[in-house]
Image: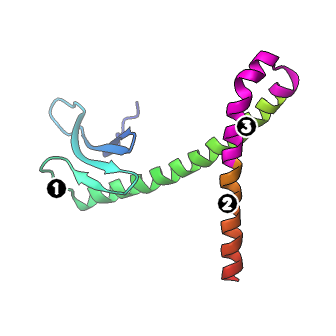
């Protein structure tokens, strides 16, 4: 562990994080974490914990973390989709080269429905973008 600890610790949870102020300035030199807020990534809401009043440095650190977290989650979303494309290609190769009749019977209908659903949404979204671009021009 490095000798310099951050001023804040963010315990990530599904919708955001709990925010703790890290304190080592005590006589026992123990690490104390004071729960100061909860952050919701979906709507950007910051709720002070209990009767705690957030300071400007608290708000600034929380906003920086929130901005970084939103950007990271957006990158992960795109990366997950690109991994899905890779997995679809691997699935195609599996179907082409190794799948048994029984395996194909088990997966064909669900794959076809999922691909049809995805294609329908992609085509609709693409048409919406084309129409918007045409209207903007």
Closer to us: 100 or 27: 100
Q: Residue at x 68, y 39 (%)?
A: 113
Magenta-highlighted stretch: main secondary structure?
A: helix
Closer to us: 29 or 64: 64
Q: Is residue 53 visible?
A: yes
78 with respect to 37 (left or right): right
Tell me the residue that label 2 is attached to.
124
Where residue 50 sits in the image (x, y, percent)? Answer: 14, 47
Q: CA distance from mark 1 to mark 2?
A: 47 Å
SS for dot 3: helix
Q: Residue at x 66, y 67 (%)?
A: 128
Picture disc at residue 112: 3
Q: CA distance from mark 1 to mark 3?
A: 54 Å
Where residue 87 sits in the image (x, y, percent)? Answer: 72, 34
Q: Is residue 83 visible?
A: no
Point out the stretch of residues depicted in magenta: 94-118
Check if mark 1's residue and mark 2's residue have beta carbons within 8 Å.
no
Tell me the residue that label 1 is attached to.
53
Residue 3: image quadrant is: top left
Q: Quadrant of the N terminus?
A: top left
């Amino acid at each position: 562990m490095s000798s310099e600890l951050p001023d804040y610790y963010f315990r990530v949870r599904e919708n955001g994080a709990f925010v703790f102020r890290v304190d080592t300035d005590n006589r026992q030199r123990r690490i104390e974490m004071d729960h100061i807020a909860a952050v919701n990534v979906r709507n950007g809401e910051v709720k002070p914990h209990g009767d705690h009043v957030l300071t400007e440095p608290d708000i600034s650190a929380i906003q920086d973390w929130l901005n970084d977290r939103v950007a990271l989650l957006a990158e992960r979303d795109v990366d997950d989709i690109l991994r899905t494309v890779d997995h679809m290609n691997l699935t195609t190769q599996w179907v082409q080269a190794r799948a048994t009749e029984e395996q194909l019977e088990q997966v064909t209908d669900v794959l076809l429905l999922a691909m049809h659903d995805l294609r329908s949404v992609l085509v609709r979204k693409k048409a919406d973008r084309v129409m918007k671009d045409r209207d903007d021009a």
